[in-house]
Amino acid sequence: MKNMASTCPMELGKIVDEYFAENRHRLIELAAFLDRMDRAHDGESPALDFRVAALRQAIPMLLQPGPERVKRIQLLLSDPSDEPRTNLDRKAAYGAYSGAGRIL
Amino acid sequence: MDYIEPHAHMISRTTDDYRQMALMGCVALSEPAFWAGWDRKSADSFEDYFGQLTEFEPARAAQFGIQHYTWLCLNPKEGENRELALQVLQRIPKYLERPNVLGIGEIGLNRNTMRELETFKDHVSLALDHNKMILIHTPHLEDKHKGTRLIIKALQSFQNLDPRKVMIDHAEEHTIEMIRDNGFRCGLTLYPNTKVSYERAADIIEMHGPEGIYVNSACDWGISTPTAVPQFMFEMRRRKHDEETIRKVVYENPIAFFSQSAHFRIARAAAPVARTEELAYVD
């Protein structure tokens, strides 16, 4: 990878001008998602779902120093094992590594 | 600016999508064989599909001056069915010399199973036996990093494989380095939710440079955008990237990769071709 500094041709102020609103929106959407799970009528704890647990682990990583926040979060959400699965469990990916976790 | 769409499943798109792509500057596209959304029951189904990819879709694209190229395979989502895979592999060679076929693809892994891996290796062998290029699908989400590792390891077990003739697609921030460091070409897919956004694709180009990278929509029957490449171009312009860099990613890099097939000949702004009698029944 190239030196990460100064590889975006936009000035910082311009980056904020261009991208702040959409990322504010994403942050509010994430908060709404967390609130929605808390309001689920069955009263289950969202953190029991491995996908939500992984998301909760990832959120503090946003505030870690850059520049590879994206990559660190992607790796957190990835299957770290090396061997192929013996059998197909399902067609679609979950979005987070299940390990021994469960889905609600 | 003219552009090339290197990965579009046009069989699942409307004729109006071809028109919109042409209006936005698309002069050529390539369509890898993929999953229909359901598992096909026989190799005969694949023969019909390969016929559509090599006859019907090129004619549909030509109406709008778009050159249509394709890649053939049994896709990774059906790779678990070894019996079907072996039957389809036997039938592919007779289509390989059709004029719009660039190679074998999109092959790869889906859930990183042992049988998927065997089917993948069989396809690589087929490509090498026929001196064809390879287009690779890397798995989704949590399976992508591991799948990309398994794919590269499998490719490197073939002594006579030239990595410059292999495009590893659907790369993201956590896989791009292992792809490029091992000499393979690299595709970024502009697809909602599960792959990269226009903004992240531009970030990746800024961080890693444009060498050996192209961008594509992988538009299919899901929620996806056939005009994603021009939207990426717009994002690059928003950031004041020069036209030379943008053209390299959306036009020159795809040409450099595809031109390794004798079947690929880019003709700038080809004239639209009149509809055939068969196509007249489309609408």
Image: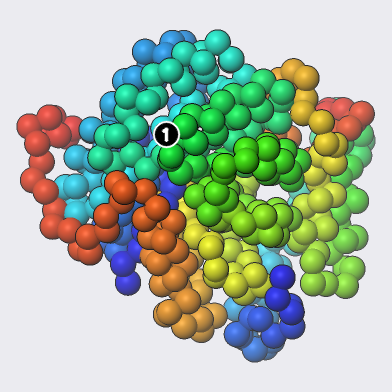
Q: Position of residue B171 (x, y in %)?
A: 62, 52
Quadrant where the C terminus of chain B sits is: top left
The answer to whether B36 is drawn above or below residue B271 in the figure is: above
Task: Quickly name the residue at label 1.
Answer: B130
Mark 1 neighbour density, 10 Å: few (under 14) some (14–19) many (20 or more): some
Work out whether residue B209 or residue A52 is closer to the camera in this orientation and state it: B209
In the displayed orientation, state which residue is furthest to the front.
B159
- The residue located at (72%, 70%) in the rendering is A1
Q: Position of residue B9 (x, y in %)?
A: 40, 40
Quadrant where the N terminus of chain B sits is: bottom left
Q: Position of residue A45 (x, y in %)?
A: 92, 35
The answer to whether B86 is drawn above or below residue B219 in the figure is: above
Q: Is residue B176 left or right of residue A75?
A: left
- The residue located at (23%, 33%) in the rendering is B56
Tell me the quarter of the picture where residue A29 sits.
Answer: bottom right
Looking at the image, can residue B246 be seen?
Answer: yes
Q: Amino acid at mark 1?
A: His
Looking at the image, can residue B192 be seen?
Answer: no
Q: Is residue B11 left or right of residue B278?
A: right
The structure's colour scheme is rainbow
Question: Which secondary structure, mark 1?
Answer: loop
Identify the chain of the residue marked 1, using the numbered disc in the image. B
Work out whether residue A56 or residue A44 is closer to the camera in this orientation and state it: A56
Tell me the quarter of the picture where residue B206 sits.
Answer: bottom right
- The residue located at (77%, 25%) in the rendering is A85
Q: Position of residue B67 (x, y in %)?
A: 25, 50
Q: Is residue A49 left or right of residue A94?
A: right
Q: How many marks?
A: 1
- The residue located at (83%, 72%) in the rendering is A66
